[in-house]
Image (spheres, rainbow, N blue to C red):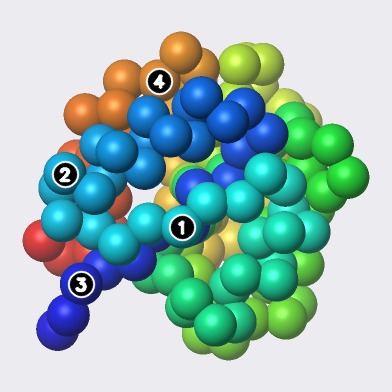
Amino acid sequence: MGIKKILVVDDEPYLREILIENFELEGFEVKSACNGIEALEIIPNFRPHIVLTDIRMPDCDGIELFKRMIKQISPPIPVIFMSGYAGSNELEKLRTDKSFAGFYDKPLVIDNIIIKIKQLLGD
């Protein structure tokens, strides 16, 4: 079925690089964006199978990215959220959407995210 693609969205360059390196070692094709606006520009051409996004970012945060993806992209792309700020009332409201695929607290345990991604992709 081809190489699975992941889009990593986070305003921390160091974290993006760590995630990219780990996902590439697992055989995924990975691109990254520093905020939701950049992610929305990448998605149409890259066509990721999963989006992993931070919640708090400048310009367009992860929740706003998620809401825009729901409206603009079909079929929906599963979204996994990550944040250093436990819980979010708005995030709880989004959990009912089928493209909401999970949430991980920072600091991340990357192996757990890789397991979740492989489950979502049927690997």
**How far is disc 2 from disc 3 in space, using C-alphas?**
12 Å
**Is 57 or 70 nearer to us in this picture?**
57
The nearer-to-camera label among 3 and 4 is: 3
Q: Which residue is mark 2?
A: 25
Q: Amino acid at mark 1?
A: Lys
C-beta proximity under 8 Å, tags 1 and 2: no
Residue beneath label 4, please?
108
Mark 1, residue position: 31
Q: Is residue 59 left or right of residue 50?
A: right
- Mark 2 touches mark 3? (CB < 8 Å): no
First of labels 4, 1 by sequence position? 1
Q: Residues within 10 Å of mark 1 (few under 14, many from 20)?
A: some
Identify the residue at horizontal 73%, vertical 53% (top origin).
36
Residue 84 falls in which quadrant of the image? top right
Say whether disc 4 or disc 2 marks the residue closer to the N-terminus: 2
The amino acid beneath tag 3 is Ile
Which residue was labeled with disc 3? 3
